[in-house]
Image (tube, rainbow, N blue to C red):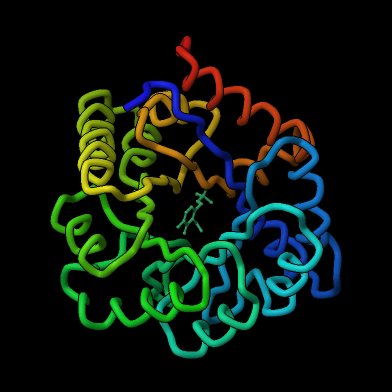
Amino acid sequence: MSEKRPIRLGVNIDHVATLRNARGGEHPDPVRAAQLAASAGADGITAHLREDRRHIRDDDMRRLQEEIDLPLNFEMAATAELLKLCTEVRPHACCLVPENRNERTTEGGLDVAGQHNFITPFVRELTDAGIRASLFVDPEERQIEAAKSAGAPVIEIHTGAYYEAAAVTQPKRIEAEFEKIRMAAAFADSLGLEVHAGHGLTFHNVQPVAAIPQLMELNIGHFLVGEAVFMGLGESVKEMKRLIQDARTGGHF
Ligand code: PXP
């Protein structure tokens, strides 16, 4: 395995839609944000259509697929309604995530091991529709094994616990959570899965994760949109891209 596999940055534009929806209307437009992210060097666009439509709406997904010239990663809960819409939109990829209406954000990975018989048909239908299925899981071997046996070609490792440890600056916890991600990426790769990661990644915590050689894609949203308030979306995407490329190519961090 090469140490220098390329790594992609998927920019999640959900929170541009959060801001738009705070006032209703059409501004700021998440599709325009996706265009800007594309010209700043994003390798893909990610958007999460939640069951309650609190940020991205059905029509945003359609427009992202039609108007943006980058692979679209459609995140959603495993429901029949969302599956129907996703197979109509036909994005490049679909990442299945757990969803709890009362949560602020996706709090944990999908329990693929516990819901194997429920998840597998979703993976099959997505695959039959030509959509690359990805399962968002915690960095645990049993979940990764279950994702493999459900037929998913891709997993995305939930990096939220690492983010939380970094946020309270507890070095031992950061190291332990990072180690789980590193081991999970190596394990998934050894099973032949393509490995992505995301959730809570920032300029300050992204580089050790980006340096994990098996990771092929990082999906990052909230921090980039937050930082856009201060430096502009184009600059925040460019800086994130620079940090992850530097980490991957031999990195100083
Ligand atoms: N990946 C997945 C599967 C997610 O659900 C999310 C949050 O919607 C992200 C990545 C991005 O997380 P954040 O907004 O914290 O960067």
In the depicted view, which residue is nearer to us: 47 or 224?
47
* Residue 234 located left or right of residue 111: right
Residue 79 image point, x, y percent: 43, 85
In the depicted view, which residue is nearer to us: 97 or 185?
185
Question: What residue is rendered at 36% in x and 62% in y?
Answer: 135
Residue that lies at the very extreme toward the left in this rendered image: 142
Above or below 55: residue 138:
above
**Which quadrant of the view contains residue 99?**
bottom left
Above or below 65: residue 45:
above
**Which quadrant of the view contains residue 52?**
bottom right
* Residue 59 located left or right of residue 123: right
Residue that lies at the very extreme toward the top in this rendered image: 252
Residue 71 image point, x, y percent: 64, 55
Above or below 163: residue 56:
below
Could you tell me which quadrant the N terminus lies in?
Answer: top left
Residue 130 image point, x, y percent: 52, 71
In the depicted view, which residue is nearer to us: 23 or 195?
195
Could you tell me which quadrant the C terminus lies in?
Answer: top left
Question: What residue is rendered at 43% in x and 65% in y?
Answer: 133
